Amino acid sequence: MTKVSEAPKARLERPVHPAPKEGRRLPFIVEFYGSAVAKKWLMAVTGIMLMGFVFAHMVGNLKLYFGEKSLNHYAEWLKEIGEPIFPRTGLLWILRFVLLGAVVVHIVSAAQLTRMNRRARPDRYQAPRDYAAATFASRTMRWTGVIVALFVVYHLMDLTWGVGGAEWTSGEVYQNIINSFERWPIAIVYIVANLALGVHLYHGGWSMFQSLGWNNGKFNDWRRMFAIGFATIVVVGNVSMPLMVVTGVVN
Amino acid sequence: MALDAKIPAGPIAHKWDNHKFDVKLVNPANKRRFKVIVVGTGLAGASAAASLAELGYQVEVHTFHDSPRRAHSIAAQGGINAAKNYRNDDDSVHRLFYDTVKGGDYRAREANVYRLAQVSVDIIDQCVAQGVPFAREYGGLLDNRSFGGAQVSRTFYARGQTGQQLLLGAYQALANQIQLGNVKLHNRSEMLDLVVKDGVAVGIVARNLMTGAITSHSAHAVVLATGGYGNVFYLSTNAKASNVTAAWRAHKRGAYMANPCFTQIHPTCIPASDEFQSKLTLMSESLRNDGRIWVPKEFGDERPPGQIPEEDRDYYLERRYPAFGNLVPRDVASRASKREVDAGRGVGPLKNGVYLDFADAIDRLGRHVIEERYGNLFQMYERITGEDPYVVPMRIYPAVHYTMGGLWVDYNLMSNVPGLYVLGEANFSDHGANRLGASALMQGLADGYFVLPATIGDYLAPQLGSQPVTTDDPVFAETQRSVEDTISRFLSIRGTRSVDWFHRELGKIVWDNCGMARSTESLEKAIAEIPALREEFWNDVRILGEGDTLNQSLEKAGRVADFLEFGELMCRDALHREESCGGHFRVEHQTEDGEALRNDDDFAYVAAWEYTGDHASPALHKEQLEFENVHLAQRSYK
Amino acid sequence: MKVTLTVWRQPGPTATGKFETYEVDEVSEDMSFLELFDVLNDRLVGKGEEPVAFDHDCREGICGSCSMMINGRPHGPELGTATCQLHMRKFQDGAKITVEPWRAAAFPIVRDLVVDRSAFDRIVESGGYITAPTGSAPDGNLILIPKAVADSAMDAAQCIGCGACVAACPNGAANLFTAAKIMHLNLLPQGQPERWERVTNMVQTMERYFGSCTNHGECQTACPKEISIDFIALMNRDYIKAQFKQRRLASQRG
């Protein structure tokens, strides 16, 4: 019952993403993953797993300071854990696959969310922004994330597969590390990558509480302190190793 | 035409219940066959649209805002009255009714006011159920406060943002109905004319403000909930876009405009600071509970307020009204301020305010108590003026705030044009010559949630089976053409002055001559000046741009053009009403001590004006007011 | 005082826009930022140029119409203040001020500084209400609400829907707006029956229009009502819970 004297020129309002089709119910996990809030939740959950790994990895490797025997024994033990219920290296492989899964979910979610965010603001501000709250860490998450991911690939090549250019022998963990870190450009790569990891953890270690919905006036102040503390410990622990080797304190 | 208010018979306490039984009903299955257009999405419009849609009517809503939530009801601060008597302080429906009639200086229709008081209790329940976060006591019960000098605590509030929360409640209910497909929302769609066929309202013509498209919309009934006309004064506490256009165009199509001279001036607003001032900001009336109002005794006393000793200050409200002091009603307080400023004792750089001083209250109660009570208001004051009210007294001055007049409606809220309903501030009905604090929200929601949904069936039921007049009907084409012609005319003037200039000039004329004090002389002056300004407007206004895009100058031009016509009617109404009552103060009619002097013998009626043509005088119709339940008395606050 | 305004001018939704610079003198420091635009527009009309289109209405910080990106910040430098309540005394004489519209895919520019924020209405329509048809309500005091809960709900409910959170967010996300709307209702006892449907539907509608939250916290700093991102965390929690909840058993504790 509405007569239009001329067609409206442009329908302005437009969703960036189409509405899901009516009547089609996708499997729960697919539907769940379809939401950005759920993706962030998954990033927080996988982030916690990766934080656990990063922390354990650092603590384990600090055995570098207790000498060759201690570190190599620890490396051997990693292969044995879970015996006899699991075969040798069995549990280790399970953990590796779980970690790999977490990494994939973390990165794919991040990439998809980044794409979504770009589409949400196709035309950027034409004048400079004056950020009031966003930190360097929060605004560089995707770059520190990429740096850490690339570093992890190199780190595996260098010290797990032995194709990083340094002299490498399977099982001789201590010597492999010394061989690698004695090359000062590689030590710098390790240090820079771990600083990037620290920046990533500084924001991620706080942000995950928000994404998980863990918000309570009683402990909110501690969330930031946790992130700072965790990032500091990991960075100090990890950076110390190449630093000590390249400066000749450990050899 | 005789004005029949269709007030139901019977004792006042039973009128509404009896009436609800007597009105014709539309069968639930048939309601969807009726289409209703609601214009405006403030408290009245949004609540009406949502409630009608819940009943099953097809509803089409127009708002000129980008979202229904932006209507100016959102700015109401203080609260909403309801006769709940949760405080055990002897409140009752009858007391709220009595206070409202008396506060309105006996110029409101008793039956409407009684109904308003009756449904006020249901409004609170409804809003709580919708999730309006009213202030609560520690025990979880609803909190109340006393407001505007009322003798009981009957005001419900949500911090200083009651209007916002109530509007969001109504907007949410509307959003629900939009989602269900029962309401079709047209945002940024401004009603520019009412379509009347054979004396019956059949639709509207609207302009899409984003694309400039002019469209016709037809329905079985049209509901206007388009707010008040306070912006005729240019400077007011109304939002910038608030206007009289929808009501005025309906008036020109036959609807009577009632009591347009009843305008309310709020005493505690921040005075204008410079010539660029675009609007005035209201400071809650509650400030008068603890602040003391004064001016220097000496003319032209240039000392800073802190250095003016007690003996050189005139606490004029406390002096003149010892019983009520700083808490006299709005109209009395406003006129007293004007008297001081007019006498040359005004304060501030422009000498256009009076002091509202909290120094004594801070001494007595401590700064933290004042901060707790008024912290956000003090912050707002400081933001606007750059002065710290904890140290320097606030400067305040009255400003236009609310308009009690509006389109005439009967007990069913239908205007004299069949099929045209008018709700909220846009109608004239419930506040008489002066509105009590916290009653505007109550009336808007009463009309929208409870009154209109009950009464509209009476008009619609007999039309069952009839289709609304289609938009193909020549009457729509004709109305649409006249709207398009007006727009082309605006764009073709290409004069030299901006729309705002004309608006400011009009504002000065009506404020100076038809503001807080009116006289035969001033009103006659205004009635002579307004047509001249209108003439100049139509010859010299400059509106740039085109009609087929967003064009804010063009939007404003239409509104100011209507104010230029409406302002004259307002002055004529003020001139004809030879008495002082409520917000209408005629200097010729005052007691020896300068108080308003009513004339109940000759003016206890509603003045409803009929439009008779562009160059003809409006015709006056009277609805005599009968007071059977409230005894008429002169108000005294001494 | 005198200021130099650099303003985004764009004649229509599909037209290309650009910055124009205007010198405005004789500015009073008591003026609000919008009154500065009134003055600019009056002078532009005097010169025969089209005035700058900008959204505004109540001019007392509550309607949420005004929306200007001032020197890279939504609503300008003053915290907890909408553009209409920003006064010129906050700027230096001779200040250079750049003004842009909100930018987000869901807020297309209509003209100059005016954007279309209807996407917010779509979010509310998808669940931002309590189904309580008129007339069906019990007495307002029947359901007790602890004062602290009512206060928290009010903290969320005071959102004015201006869109500054979206404008401020580096991702163009509307999580603060949506969270405020959801949590206002989800915190109240009256909002419980529709709690899980509400959060699911509103979040999903939000995500059709806007970006995602990466917890920068820009939104709460830009918010003229200073609404906390704590509500975003609560919304996230409710959303995830809602996905795993057996809603037919939702009224059971635990």
Image (tube, grey):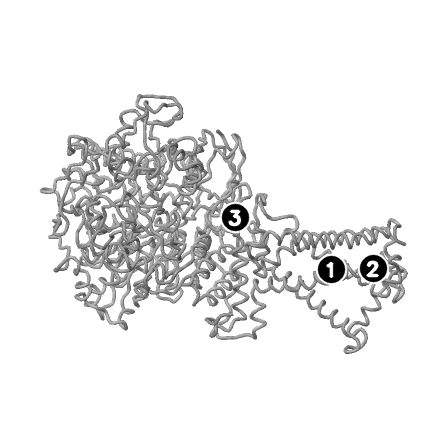
Q: Say which mark, if any, is on residue C16.
A: 3
Instruction: Give the amino acid at mark 1.
Output: Phe
Give residue A55's mark: 1
In this view of the protein, which residue sits in the foreground, A95 or A23? A95
Task: Please name the residue that numbered disc 2 is placed on.
Answer: A63
Q: Earlier in the sequence, mark 1 or mark 2?
A: 1
Question: Can you tell which quarter of the image residue B539 is in?
Answer: top left
Q: Chain of mark 3?
A: C
Query: Would you say residue B235 is visible in this rendering?
Result: no
Residue A75 picture location, percent across and down: 83, 66
Relative to residue A24, is residue C216 depicted above or below?
above
Residue C246 shown left or right of residue B278 in the figure: right
Residue at x-position 12% and y-position 50%:
B626
Looking at the picture, tell me which residue is in the foreground, A30 or A138: A138
CB under 8 Å between callouts 1 and 2? no
Amino acid type of disc 2?
Lys
Label 3 to label 2, Cα distance in Å?
62 Å
* Mark 3 surroundings: few (<14), some (14-19) or many (≥20) residues within 10 A: few
Q: Nearer the viewer, residue B425 or C210?
A: B425
The chain letter for the residue carrying disc 1 is A
Q: On the same chain: label 3 and label 2?
A: no
Could you tell me how far apart the alpha carbons at marks 1 and 2 are, in whole angstroms?
Answer: 13 Å
